[in-house]
């Protein structure tokens, strides 16, 4: 692969995550739309990729309109896969190469690293995705994959005369676990490849392959109805506190919102007299109004001294603290005064000055176009950018189907 240029860090590398998701499935009908933890498998994969710090673009490759719609709702771009790449004989690499070419042609840019992320692994974490991406983008591997420690004795049926044969052990000797070399099981969840190398070799394991260890408790591939049932049973345990998981009705008592870059697009217009103007989103205003009517405590918290912040708070009829130097101290004091447990607070922000507040609350949320460090520290990431409906999206998480039913 092409070496990473000296001084060029991960942030400078374009990392494209491709999620193949065909509509047809023989083992589990409509498998990629099957909900686990209340979220379709394809959406879980998209959210995990979007929450990964190194991923710059997320694409779902599909031949199915319903999967495409679910992928777009979760925040991914969609590449419609031709029929020739959608049957049982088509390889995942072929789908990835097609998506890579399509994405680069549409965006007039070239990816440095391409990821293959399988939505049939529902408990894949953003840090696992980052780890395989980093192996290629930063550490110089050509390819990488997620693996998990495996200590089992493997058998294979041979013929009627011999019956079963040991694959990683002899019948005459069964060494103790600590005396055996550790085997590593390919999880099937995430792979990373140098993009140019993939174009040349057209398979996922060329060159030097780095093995990225993951938690074996999270290794589960959904291939049949029994796997799906196990995933649904495990979701309440494995999704607890999971990055990329979303808060729902009853999870939050208070919502605290940053202003610039969260309720705006982070731009400021200045006229000849030096007056500053910002643009906000009407949908965000509707979301705040719905949260207020639902009885949640609300606050706008900003370091910005511009009176437009207070004016927006008056318009929304919620409290505001702005022009503060230490947002985390102000937030802690506000929680004490309001009698709100910090772990029951959702804080939405976009830039590095929000990170101290992220460390205080139970639900740190980054808007879609937040700084990569903020996205990496967030427990959930919106699909909408700041100033473009991100707050309305958060309201939808918290109020669910009740959002649109609330009186205007």
Image (tube, rainbow, N blue to C red):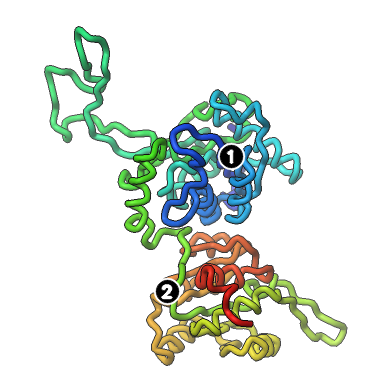
Residue 88 found in image quarter:
top right
Q: Secondary structure at mark 2?
A: loop
Locate residue 305 relative to residue 176 in the image: left or right: right
The picture places residue 293, in percent across and down from the top left corner, at 55, 84
Which residue is pictured at 43% across the width and 43% down the height? 121
Above or below for 56 versus 86: below
Per the model, the C-alpha gap separating discs 1 and 2 is: 38 Å
**Is 176 located above or below residue 307 in the figure?**
above
Residue 157 visible from this viewpoint: yes
Residue that lies at the very extreme toward the right in this rendered image: 272
Q: Position of residue 37 (x, y in %)?
A: 42, 56
Number of other residues with Cα within 10 Å of mark 1, as a class: few under 14, some 14 to 19, many 20 or more: many
Residue at 59% from the left image edge and 50% from the top image edge: 71
Q: Give the residue drawn at x 55%, y 66%.
A: 366
Query: For the N terminus, which image quadrant?
Result: top right
- Which one is earlier in the sequence, the residue at label 1 or at label 2? 1
| Quadrant (top left/top right/bottom left/bottom right) for the C terminus | bottom right
Q: Is residue 234 above or below residue 281?
A: above
Which is closer to the viewer, label 1 or label 2? 2
Q: Quadrant of residue 196?
A: top right
For residue 197, say whether it is visible: no
213 vs 126: above or below: above
Mark number, residue 399: none
Q: Dot 2 corresponds to which residue?
A: 250
Where residue 335 sits: x, y (%)? 43, 86
Name the one closer to the observer, 275 or 189. Answer: 189
Number of residue marks: 2
For residue 132, side relative to residue 19 (left or right): left
Q: Secondary structure at mark 1?
A: strand
Q: Residue at x 67, y 73 (%)?
A: 283
User: In the rendered image, which residue does mark 1 sit on?
Assistant: 114
Q: Is residue 279 left or right of residue 76?
A: right
């Amino acid at each position: 692969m092409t070496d990473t240029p000296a001084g060029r860090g991960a942030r400078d590398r374009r990392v494209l995550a491709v999620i193949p998701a065909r509509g047809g499935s023989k083992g589990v009908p409509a498998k990629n739309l099957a909900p686990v933890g209340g979220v379709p498998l394809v959406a879980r994969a998209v959210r995990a990729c979007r929450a990964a710090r190194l991923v710059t673009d997320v694409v779902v490759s599909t031949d199915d309109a319903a999967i495409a719609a679910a992928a777009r709702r979760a925040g991914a771009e969609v590449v419609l896969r031709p029929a020739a790449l959608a049957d049982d004989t088509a390889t995942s690499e072929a789908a990835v190469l097609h998506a890579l070419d399509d994405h680069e042609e549409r965006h007039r840019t070239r990816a440095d690293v391409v990821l293959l992320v399988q939505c049939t692994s529902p408990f894949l974490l953003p840090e696992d995705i980052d780890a395989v991406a980093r192996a290629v983008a930063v550490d110089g591997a050509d390819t990488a994959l997620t693996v998990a420690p495996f200590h089992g004795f493997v058998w294979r049926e041979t013929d009627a005369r011999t019956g079963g044969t040991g694959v990683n052990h002899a019948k005459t000797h069964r060494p103790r676990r600590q005396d055996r070399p550790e085997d590593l099981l390919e999880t099937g969840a995430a792979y990373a490849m140098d993009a140019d190398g993939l174009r040349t070799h057209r398979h996922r394991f060329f060159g030097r392959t780095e093995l990225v260890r993951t938690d074996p408790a999270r290794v589960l591939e959904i291939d049949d109805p029994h796997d799906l049932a196990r995933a649904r049973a495990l979701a309440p345990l494995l999704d607890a506190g999971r990055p990329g998981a979303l808060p729902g009705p009853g999870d939050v008592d208070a919502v605290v919102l940053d202003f610039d870059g969260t309720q705006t697009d982070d731009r400021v217009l200045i006229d000849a007299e030096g007056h500053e103007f910002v643009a906000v989103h009407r949908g965000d205003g509707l979301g705040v109004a719905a949260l207020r009517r639902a009885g949640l405590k609300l606050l706008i918290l900003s370091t910005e001294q511009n009176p437009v912040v207070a004016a927006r708070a008056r318009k929304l009829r919620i409290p505001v603290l702005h022009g503060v130097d230490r947002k985390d101290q102000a937030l802690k004091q506000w929680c004490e005064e309001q009698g709100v447990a910090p772990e029951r607070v959702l804080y939405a922000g976009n830039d590095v000055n929000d990170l101290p507040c992220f460390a205080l609350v139970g639900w740190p949320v980054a808007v879609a176009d937040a700084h990569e460090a903020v996205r990496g520290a967030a427990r959930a990431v919106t699909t909408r950018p700041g100033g473009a409906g991100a707050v309305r999206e958060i309201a939808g998480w918290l109020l669910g189907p009740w959002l649109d039913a609330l009186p205007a």
